[in-house]
Image (cartoon, rainbow, N blue to C red):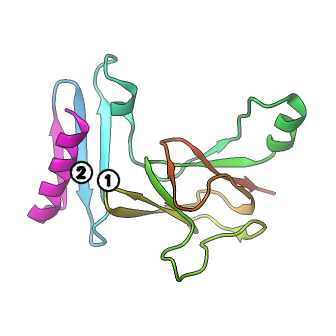
Amino acid sequence: MDLKEIQNLIKFVAKSGASEVKLEMEDVKITIRTGSNLETIVQQIPVSQHMPQQAMQTAQPAQAVPAVSDAPVSSADDNSKYITIKSPIIGTFYRKPSPDKPLFVEVGQNISEGDVLCVIEAMKLFNEIESEVSGTIVKVLVDDSSPVEFDQPLFLVDPS
C-alpha cells in the first residue's frame, strides 16, 4: 500500500464519520482513529521484515530519548545530560498555534509533562506535540515553519 492510497483512505474515513477503522493486509496493518478534534492517527505495523523503512513509521506521541551526538567527545558530554524530544511524524514544524499567537515554548522556559511544545502539520492536520518529560527547554533545534522528518530532534530539555 503506497502513501497515496493511505491518504485517500484517511480522507474517506474522515468523510464517513467513522471513529476507528482497522485494515490488515498481508504486509501491513493500519489503524485510523478520528476524534472530536478531527486529528487522524495512522499506525502502520510491519508484519514482515521486507517492508521499506518509510512504510514502518508510526504516528505516536513525542518520545523522550537520550541525546545522541556524532560530535566530538566534549560536545557529547555537554549534551549527554539533556533529553532530546523528537518528532513523532513527518510534516511542517510550527512554534506557534497561529501567526498572531505567542510561541508555545521558549528557551529557558520550564515545562511539565503534557505541555504543548509545538505543532506539526501533516496532510492538512495540525498535531499538537506534547512533552513527556518535565524540565527546562535548553535549545530549539528546528526553525519555525521548517519541514521535519520522523524521529528528527526538535528540542533539548534539561530534566534537572
Residue type beneath disc 2: Ile
Q: Quadrant of residue 17?
A: bottom left
Q: What x and y, as percent, mark residue 42?
A: 30, 48
SS of the residue at dot 1? strand
Residue 6 falls within the magenta-colored stretch: yes
- Left or right of residue 139: residue 56: left
Residue 18 located left or right of residue 114:
left
Inter-mark Cα distance, 1 to 2: 6 Å
Q: Disc 1 vs disc 2: Cβ atoms closer than 8 Å?
A: yes
- In this view of the protein, which residue sits in the foreground, 56 or 145? 145
Q: Residue 154: x, y in percent? A: 61, 51
Quadrant the N terminus occupies: top left
Question: What residue would you read off at disc 1?
Answer: 41
Query: Measured from the top left, where is residue 158 in percent x and y?
Result: 78, 55
Q: Quadrant of the C terminus?
A: bottom right
> x, y percentage for residue 100?
52, 83
Q: Secondary structure at mark 2?
A: strand
- Residue 62, compared with residue 103, is above or below; it is above
Residue displayed at 31% across by 43% down: 43
Nearer to me, 141 or 35: 141
Q: Is residue 13 magenta?
A: yes
Q: Name the N-terminal-most of marks 1 and 2.
A: 2
Considering only vertical position in the picture, is 145 above or below 5? Answer: below
| 116 lies left or right of 50 | right
Using the image as rendered, state which of residue 112 and residue 37 is in the foreground: 37
Which portion, as a residue range, is magenta?
1-24
Residue at 69%, 61% in the rendered image: 134
Quarter of the image where one finds residue 44: top left
Give the residue number, with chain letter if any, for mark 2. 32
Q: What's the amino acid at mark 1?
A: Ile
